Image (cartoon, rainbow, N blue to C red):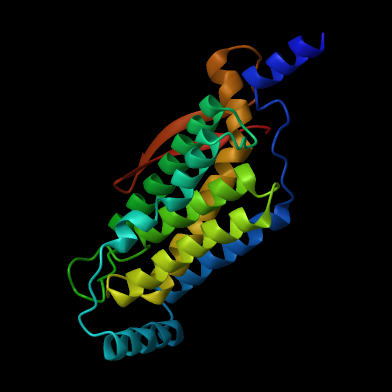
Amino acid sequence: MLTTGIKAQERDSTQQKYKPKAAVFIPGAIAVTYGFVALNSNLFRRFDNYLFEEAREHHPGYRTKVDDYMRYAPAAAVYGLDLFGVKGKHNFKDKSALFLLSSVLTNGSVLILKKSSNRLRPNRLNDYSFPSGHTASAFAYAEYLSQEYGDQSIWYTVGGYGAAGATAVLRIYKNYHWFSDVVAGAGMGVLSTKFAYLIYPSLKKMISGNKKSNMVVLPVYQNGGAGLVISGKF
């Protein structure tokens, strides 16, 4: 009976639902709100410009591609730890599904906002500055690492968020983003992963058909942007 129980637990690592308190969403929501306010606030815009001038003065012509790869470091750590036998909260299948769901939510929301906000980058390359996609991905994967291994050691969380923070700083140094862009991106990434962990058990039940689900997922298209409306009891 003990062996059977262990095998059942290995097959389904989502039996214990992720039931966060509302307070865990507040930091991410504040970050996103800051970014939106900065789009129309002269005060916040002046702060963006101040940091832009500081970065340009102390790091003129700064170039690197480290940020293009560092944003994936926390996610790579999750699979690296699993490869070396350090098990997280979920098995490989569920872990991968959560990674995919988090990525879709993060990249989808970033893409919609980039196309609708039309904010010019500091380097004037294009008007896809808001929010920072690199930063959103980095923080989404940092939260992913924290969700899977944060309970085992706080250093996994510290390391993941450290890599995400470094990615955000590099985006500013390279003049690809304003400060408010990376703040909003960080908030969106964290919220996307938290939301992915919240809805995944219901999504899994709905797709597998093992149990009835109260969740409804509907595609929507509005103002030139596509997305999903998710409702129900989680």
Q: Would you identify the image quadrant in which residue 10 lies?
A: top right
Residue drawn at x 58%, y 27% is 91
Residue occupying the point 20% across, 80% down: 61
From the top left corner, tell me how far across and down residue 160 is, in percent.
53, 56
Given residues 223 and 215, the one toward you in this image is: 215
Looking at the image, which residue is at 60% across and 39% down? 197
Which quadrant is home to the C terminus?
A: top right
Answer above or below: position of 120 versus 109. Answer: below
Judged left or right of residue 16, residue 114 is left
Front residue of 68/152: it is 152
The location of residue 154, given as percent across then percent down, is: 67, 56
Q: Which residue does the image show at 82% across and 8% down from the upper left?
A: 1
Image height of 51 relative to 5, above or below: below
Rendered image quadrant of residue 63: bottom left
Looking at the picture, does residue 172 appear above or below residue 132?
below
| Image x and y of residue 127, in percent | 23, 66
Number of disc labels: 0
Q: Is residue 120 left or right of residue 32?
A: left
Of all residues shown, which one is farthest toward the right? 1
Residue 86 location (% of width, % of height): 60, 37
